[in-house]
Each structure stands twice: as structure tokens, then as C-alpha cells.
Image (cartoon, rainbow, N blue to C red):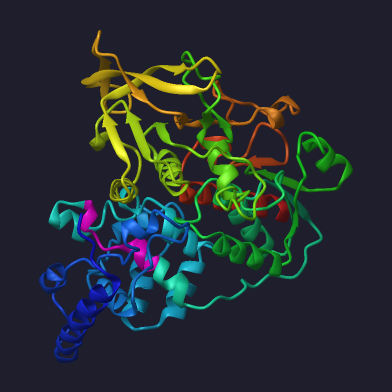
Amino acid sequence: MSHTTPESLQELAKEQWSSLETQLSECPLTAKQRMAIPQQEMPAQDPAARRTNMDEVTYGYFEEQARVEAERCLQCKNAPCIAGCPVAIDIPRFIRKISEADYSGALAVISETSLLPSICGRVCPQEVQCQEPCTVGKAKKDPFLSVSIGRLERFVADHGGRSVPQVKPETGKKVAIIGSGPAAITAAADIRREGHGVTVFEAFHKPGGVLVYGIPEFRLPKGIVEEELNTLQQMGVEVRTNFLVGRTRTLKDLLEKDGYNAIFIGSGAGLPRFMEIEGENLVGVFAANEYLTRSNLMKAYDRERADTPITRPRKVAVLGGGNVAMDAARTAVRLNAEEVNVIYRRTRTEMPARAEEVDHAEEEGVVFHFLRNPARILGDENGQVRAIEVLKYELGEPDDSGRRRPVAIPGSEYEIEVDTVIVSIGNDSNPLLTTTTPELEVNKRGNIVADESGKTSMDRVWAGGDIVLGAATVILAMGQGRKAAAAINEALLS
């Protein structure tokens, strides 16, 4: 597969921008002229090189690329892109600022509703959110040809400078935030802006939640997450790590003994699901959460400096088709696996993973087995994984999700030789918090039941993010954090 070098992309963008600048100096561009501007390709590491390192795969737009891409925006009056954004960023306005080369102004627009643009610009699935209703993509009948809103957001975050949001005078009220992932960070920032005291309680030794333990360095550098958390602490938010709410303190303790006026639960969904097939207890079978946590949070990939054990894989099978499965597969590649197989029971079209992540995995040599599903995991005499038996499938009628249901083909079993199996079929909520707090209503999956504002069945307690939604996206979690923060702020003022 050919790879366009960053240098050639920059040269092309310089030529395109020079031509556009001349046109713009004469008269404004028409919608037709904007539609004709080609979408800018994201510069990235060469696939052969990036297999051997944990550095970020994509480099971000050059300035000339950002300026050209910004001119593709039609500045629609009805702004359908805003409706597609879970935190309602004023997308046309920040893109217009890029057109004016006012990158700090663009960042200020984004920061009105989002504290995490450098993160969202990298990991959010814009193609099924803000970019899906984009008029440009609709006209071209392809959401992947929409204005590259996510890439522009990342550019602004990386070039617009950094400032600490203003905090109103102290109110004397204080709020406990459980967890430190995207929902929790967003809620903490919005509540702190109003002058309330905020304490974040994190069970792990490092804050950041899924941003730190779940998403690999090559997709989201941890230094970026640390910068965002530093901003939160500069606002006056206290962060307490190694604090397991439900064990160290209960929710009732925080409210009745520690004097917190309200609580927001944003502890995520960290309990991995398994397939309940034969062989899942063999040595060499991992939950994707465990595999990624060892690598991401504990730096197990750095064998010279980290003591965290992790299997050195030879042949790997990853079960699942979401972003976490892609992260696990691409991590295994970087841990020097000879062969990495992704086994998914539908076709590529139905995969929930971002198309960009699937493309990157293919470029890095990951092998995809579509319309396949594991029947059992086979072990050797020592209880170590030696192979996985898979069954062929075909697509039948659509199920409740609207996707065609995979139907097994009897007698089609065959084996794939592997020594490592990574299960990535989703997560449920960890039951610790809810089992120690019977006042909290949960659904059959163990997720906390909350209304549109995030209010739970327990007085003065709100919740949001994956603990309510199940495993979702960073930006959806942030949207829930914002709604809950607004409700908490209103309750504390009454």
C-alpha cells in the first residue's frame, strides 16, 4: 500500500493555498468553488516505521492544510454539524476563525463548550457525529468527504495556545466527582467554573480514566491528557488518586460525613465481557481492558524500564470489531507479534470501529477474518492457548440494531494457530459502587439509571458517561458530564 509522505502533502497544500489566496483576494468563493476544493489528507508516519514504535501515528495538519480545509466549509446558516455534536460546539464559527488565521480565537470558540479539544480532535468518531450531517458530505453523498471537522479541531488545539478557564468567586459549596475520565473531567470543569469546590476521586494511581488506560499512546499521547488534567488543577480542582469510592468511602460517607453537597458519578464501564466459550480460562487469554491497561497505563511495552509483565505474543487473535479491538490489535503489532488476526462475525461495513482505525490496522499488517466467530479456544497440555476454532457465518435478516444478523454455517469450523487471544466484545459497569449503595437504581446491565439531566434515584447524586450509557464515545460521555454539571449547578444555587 502506497504512503504519501508528510513533505509531499505540505508542498501540495502550499500550492493549493497559494491558488486559493489569489482567488479570495479577488472575491469570496462561491459554494460551488468551495465544494471543488479537495479534502486534505492527514499526514502520518509510514506504516512500516510505526509498527516499531508507540509514537503518535498521525502528525496533524500543517497550517496550509488547515487553511485549505477550512475554506471547504460552506458556513451553513442552519449549521447541521452543531446538531451532530454532543457538546454543541459552534463549528462554523471556529472554522471561520481558522480561515482568518485566528487560531487562539478558534480555540476560544471551542472552549466555550469543550475543555478537551486536543483529545476529541484525535479520538472522537466525527464521521458519525458532527461530520455525518455536513452539507458538503451530503452533496458528495459520502460522509467521509465532509469538512474534516475533527482534524481542524485537533489543529486548533495544537496551535491555538492554552488558557485556564475563569472561575467565579467561591460559593462555599463542594462537589465530589467519582472517576476522572471524559465525563468526570467535563463535569468537574463546568462545576468549578461556577465557583464550587470540586474534588475528583480516582481509583487508579493516575487520573484520566479511559483516556489513560484504554487508548494507546500511538492514538492519544498521554502528555496531552496530562496537560488537560493540569488545566483542571490550575482551576482549583483537587484530584485524589488511589481512592476507591465504595471501599475507601461510600457515597453516603461523602455526603453525610465529609460534607459534600452533591456527587457526580463518572466512573465508566470497566468490567469486561467474555464470550463464555470453552477455553477462556487458558493461559494467554486476555480481556482487552487488561491488555491495554498493562501497556498504556503501566508502560509494559517498554521492556527495558517497566516491570509490568505482559505476554510477548507470537500469533494473536483479537475477538471483536470496535475501536478497542483495533487498539488491542495494533498494540499487539507493536509488541512484536508475528501475526495479528481480528475475528469479527459481520462484514467490514458493519464494524463499529472508526474506518480510519481499520485502515491504519490494515496498513500495519493486521489480518481481518470477516463473517467468522470463535467456537472455542484450544489449549495444549500445559493449559496454554495453542489455537482458536472459528465458525463461518453469513448475514441474515436485520436485527434490533438495524444491522443484518450473522447466521452460523453448520459444519464450517476450522482452526487458526494462535498463542494469545484478546477478547474485545464490550464492557459492563463495575458493580462495586452500586452494590455498596442500594439506593442507586440500576438496569439489567448494571448501568446506573439516570434521567436526562443525569439525576439518579439517590438524593444529591448525578451520573453520566459509560456508567450510564454503557461503553460509548469520549464526546458522548462529555455531553452527559455537561448536562449533569448544569443540573448540579442549578441545584446548588437554589
**Picture layout, residue 60 above or below residue 323:** below
In the drawing, does residue 250 fall left or right of residue 407? right
Residue 65 in the image, given as x and y percentages of width and height: 28, 75
Assess whether residue 146 is covered by the magenta stretch.
yes
**What residue is rendered at 62% in x and 73% in y?**
164
Residue 470 in the image, given as x and y percentages of width and height: 51, 34
Judged from this view, the residue extending furthest toward the top is 411
Residue 80 in the image, given as x and y percentages of width and height: 29, 57
Q: Main secondary structure of the magenta part?
A: helix
**What residue is rendered at 23% in x and 37% in y?**
349
Residue 48 in the image, given as x and y percentages of width and height: 33, 57
From this viewpoint, is residue 105 visible?
yes
- Tell me the quarter of the picture where residue 203 sits: top right
Nearer to me, 140 or 59: 59
**What residue is rendered at 48% in x and 23% in y?**
385
**Picture layout, residue 132 above or below residue 253:** below
Assess whether residue 220 is covered by the magenta stretch.
no
Magenta residues, as a range?
143-153
In the drawing, does residue 84 fall left or right of residue 297? left
Nearer to me, 122 or 115: 122
**Picture layout, residue 126 above or below residue 17:** above
Judged from this view, the residue extending furthest toward the right is 257
In which quadrant is the N terminus drawn? Answer: bottom left
Nearer to me, 16 or 45: 45
In the drawing, does residue 244 fall left or right of residue 266? right
